[in-house]
């Protein structure tokens, strides 16, 4: 992908199997095949994770959960890994699996109204295994760092 063209949810859903409510990306703003990908996710107050928060809750109750921030970044990594061989059907073909994460750091909360930019870089790819690194930003501030993450793809028949 080059230039200002952006790829929305319709294309994302053709590459990875994630769907509402667990699809945690809104668009891809840059991709260099086999090298890097930048995706964004807008956090809104209508996220399922905010259901049930009472009127008396303070601002910290609206901190976007770290596991969801991590999952959103991992979905961007899955997009990069599968970009050239998409598999939108989790019940057929290959499934992307997270094999491990190292040196993950969270720096500050993300709240509704903020847009997260996930940056993913391919460190190395060996067969069906990919080592990735990157970070998530709100504006120019890093909110999460991924030292390394290993992703692999396996045929669904092996996992069933």
Image: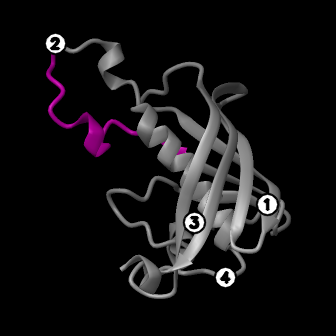
Q: Nearer the viewer, residue 17 or 48?
A: 17
* Residue named by callout 2: 56
Which secondary structure type mostly characterizes the magenta part of the structure?
Answer: loop
| Quarter of the picture holding the N terminus | bottom right
Q: Are marks 2 and 4 in contact (CB under 8 Å)?
A: no
How far is mark 1 from mark 3, CA to CA? 13 Å
How far is mark 2 from mark 3, CA to CA? 36 Å
Q: Work out whether mark 4 precedes mark 3 in sequence or the reverse, and give the earlier one.
A: 3
* Residue named by callout 4: 85
How far is mark 4 from mark 3, CA to CA? 18 Å
**Residue visible at 51% across and 48% down?**
72
Callout 1 secondary element: loop
Residue 111 appears left or right of 119: left
Q: Nearer the viewer, residue 148 or 119?
A: 148
* Residue named by callout 3: 8
Q: Is residue 8 something one can see in this rendering?
A: yes
Q: Nearer the viewer, mark 2 or mark 1?
A: 2
Q: Residues within 10 Å of mark 3 (few under 14, many from 20)?
A: some
Q: In x, y percent, where is residue 85?
A: 67, 82
Q: For the view shown, which residue lies furthest in the front direction?
A: 158
Residue 101 appears left or right of 134: left
Q: Work out whether mark 4 precedes mark 1 in sequence or the reverse, and give the earlier one.
A: 1
- Examine the structure image and report whether residue 21 is included in the region drawn in magenta: no
Q: Are marks 4 and 1 in contact (CB under 8 Å)?
A: no
Q: Work out whether mark 2 precedes mark 3 in sequence or the reverse, and give the earlier one.
A: 3
Magenta-highlighted residues = 41-55
Location of residue 128 by image quarter: bottom right
Q: Nearer the viewer, mark 1 or mark 3?
A: 3
Q: Residues within 10 Å of mark 4 (few under 14, many from 20)?
A: few
């Amino acid at each position: 992908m080059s230039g200002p063209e952006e790829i929305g949810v319709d294309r994302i859903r053709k590459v990875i199997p994630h769907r509402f409510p667990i699809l945690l990306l809104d668009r891809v703003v840059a991709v260099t095949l086999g090298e890097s990908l930048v995706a964004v996710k807008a956090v809104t107050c209508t996220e399922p994770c905010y259901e049930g928060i009472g009127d008396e809750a303070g601002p910290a109750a609206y901190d976007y959960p770290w596991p969801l921030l991590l999952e959103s970044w991992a979905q961007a990594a899955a997009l990069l890994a599968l970009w050239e061989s998409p598999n939108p059907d989790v019940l057929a073909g290959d499934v992307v699996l997270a094999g491990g994460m190292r040196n993950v750091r969270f720096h500050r909360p993300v709240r509704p109204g903020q847009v997260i930019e996930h940056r993913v870089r391919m460190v190395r790819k060996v067969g069906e295994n990919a080592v990735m690194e990157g970070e998530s930003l709100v504006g120019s501030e890093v909110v999460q760092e991924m030292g390394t993450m290993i992703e692999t793809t396996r045929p669904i028949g092996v996992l069933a």
